[in-house]
Image (cartoon, rainbow, N blue to C red):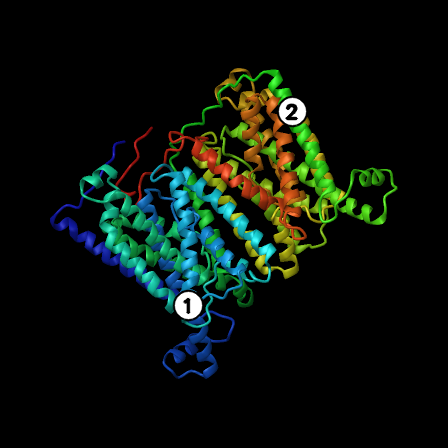
Amino acid sequence: MAVTATTPTAGPATVPSRTGAAAVTTALVLLVAALAVVDVTQGTAAVGPAEVLKALTGRADPADASVVIASRLPRMTAGLLVGAALGMAGVALQAVSRNVLASPDTLAVNAGAYLALGIAAITGVSLPLLASSGIAFAGGLAAAAVVLGLSGLGAGTVRLVLAGTALALGLTAVTQGLLLLFPEETEGLYQWNQGSIGQNGFDGVLRMLPVAVVGLAGLMVVARRVDALALGDDTARGLGVPVRATRITAVVLATLLSAAAVTLAGPIGFVGLCAPALVRPLARWFRGVTRLRTGVPVAGLVGAALVLGADVLLRAFIDTDTAVAVPTGVVTSLVGAVFLVVMAVRLRDTAQAAEPDRLRIRGRAVFVTTLTVLSLALVGVTVAAVLVGDSKLLLGDVANWLQGRAGRTVSFVLETRTPRVFAALLAGAALALAGTLVQAVTRNPLAEPAVLGVSGGGALGAVILVTSVPVAGAWGIAGAAFAGSAVTAVVVFGLAARGGFQQNRLVLVGVGVAAGTTALISLLIVLTDPFNATKALTWLSGSTYGRTMPDVLPLAAVLAVAVVTAGVRHRELDLVSLDEDTPRLLGLDLTRGRLGFLVLSVLLTAAAVAAAGTIGFVGLVAPHAARALVGRRHTRVLPVALLLGAVLVCTADLLGRTVIAPAQLGAGLMTAVIGTPYFLYVLVRGGLGQRQLGSGSRGGVRPARVHSRPR
């Protein structure tokens, strides 16, 4: 379908538009006002509507007046300001990138601001609020620049979301490392990162209000130029619009708005994504909302309604004492995750199926050499991991221990260190095999358990058990992790199966589900006992700390079964990874085979999560590197990927517990730091090319008027 545009006709046709504009604006203002009134009446203190009215008129009891003036009104105004700022920022980012999924979340603006403030916190310097806002602004702007630079403007929905998600994972991993290394300096930063509009007085709101006003005023100034960008770069230049300068200005102003919101209340997730999406349908009644100058204030009203609505619902369905501890951002993240999944399912997936890797013919000598080198590397890193740590040992100590002749100190060290080494080796191999199976079945070179939310589901299941039953054993945690991974896998692959696991739908559903599991994990950690929270955070970092041999046994059993099964069916993997038709022509039951491999990958992921926590990107890096080294035949890819995964995670675990000893960092944090650049490299290099990443919608601020051509 060609690009079509509708223009308002003259005369009476403009009257309904004006009437609709007035009706929409009035309805939104009344909705925000109603939510604000309800929000002010909610709280832990017994201060109802009557007391609030008396406080506002100066006739209330001093205690009641203090609650209203010092806590509830600041909370409500903070919700208004934060929601409006994020809604306006989302509209601007979507307009300038011509991508309906651009937002402070998907562009890693929040993750960049979080890291910047974390770095500032470890210095121990107390900064005023405006200085903190400047630091958050710098971090968010740098992250947005990287994502937009890597994904391109208007290049494709999945490309932008994947680049932003990968960068956010890497930046968040670094920040979590800082939280674990500097617990005193960063105290309260994790809770702040969940996003809460609770305030003590109006100081924060009054200081951030001018920043938000500057951002809004700037967007109003450049609105016409940004609208011209929707017509295409060449047309905009023909109209005298400085395209590059306009884009940079709009991104800077949107980041300024996001920084103001982040500084005041922490990252409030997905408001910048949901608000513009809720504004777009209003164009049927309010045609002018498709223009940025009108769309920005309307999106601000919708964003304010979202934040206040989340706060009101939270306090309406949860007892007040618990609601105080639950950040508003957790609720908006849950809503946003569901919203992203729904958008992914409804998205018209114009991406073509991924082309299979070119059939690289590698000689047997190359395979044997690769296998030999990796085997030697595995032996070397295993020996180093056993000998090196907070106490350094010799090979003779290990030999004496194996013979039962070691001293008490050496025995204690090896009895605690050896299970950690085995957990890292087996978890790396399991995740590599899981990634190989998922990529073969979906024929998606960027599919892997962490990106698709399967690891997040396993982590959620395990965290539920860790926080509710702290004395749970290894088999119990493994069962909980498997249940969580199984549920998320059913959701992700079930929703993505429509149309044959097309790339856009699969990764977007996976990203949405992963965001939802992350929000639920944050909710559990915030509400649980501080000791359990620390335990869960350490475990989520991919740490092998405190592992014992019983913890490793479930993983070893699952991995053994999976290796044998995949090895026996390696030819079927080769056929499934080619296309849809070839397996059927050869008489294979493609549906049953695909389901079997996916179940196997879920089992592997769950077992790895139970044994070593959340470790990302191994399922991406190992299969990619294996195919690059030995070609795409799975009889060779499988052993090479297993060795690569084991070496990668064991090396990450070794570095995490030795480089900054006696402090330790989880292997998951180290693999995220290593895997994020590789993921972005694969994305840019063309793992999913421009043709394969066609956007389902070209619309920025004009999705109701622009339609994609079928490709």
Q: Which residue is mark 1?
A: 204
The image quadrant that residue 369 belongs to is top right
Viewport quadrant of the N terminus:
top left
Q: Which residue is mark 2?
A: 371
Q: Nearer the viewer, residue 388 or 40?
A: 388
Element type where label 2 sits in the image: helix
Camera-side mark, 1 or 2: 2
- Camera sees residue 286: no
Classify 231 as above or below 527: above
The image quadrant that residue 322 belongs to is bottom right
Label 1 environment density (alpha carbons within 10 Å; few <14, some 14–19, many ≥20): some
> Disc 2 marks which amino acid?
Leu
Find the residue positioned furthest to the left: 11
Q: Is residue 632 left or right of residue 253?
A: right
Q: CA distance from mark 1 to mark 2?
A: 59 Å
The residue at the point 24 percent across, 40 percent down is 231
Classify 80 as above or below 476: below
Question: Where residue 229 sits: x, y (%)?
Answer: 26, 43
> Disc 1 marks which amino acid?
Gly
Q: Is residue 648 left or right of residue 235?
A: right
Question: Where residue 488 sits: x, y (%)?
Answer: 55, 42
Question: Where residue 63 sits: x, y (%)?
Answer: 48, 81
Question: Where residue 277 sits: x, y (%)?
Answer: 35, 48
Q: Nearer the viewer, residue 49 or 243?
A: 243
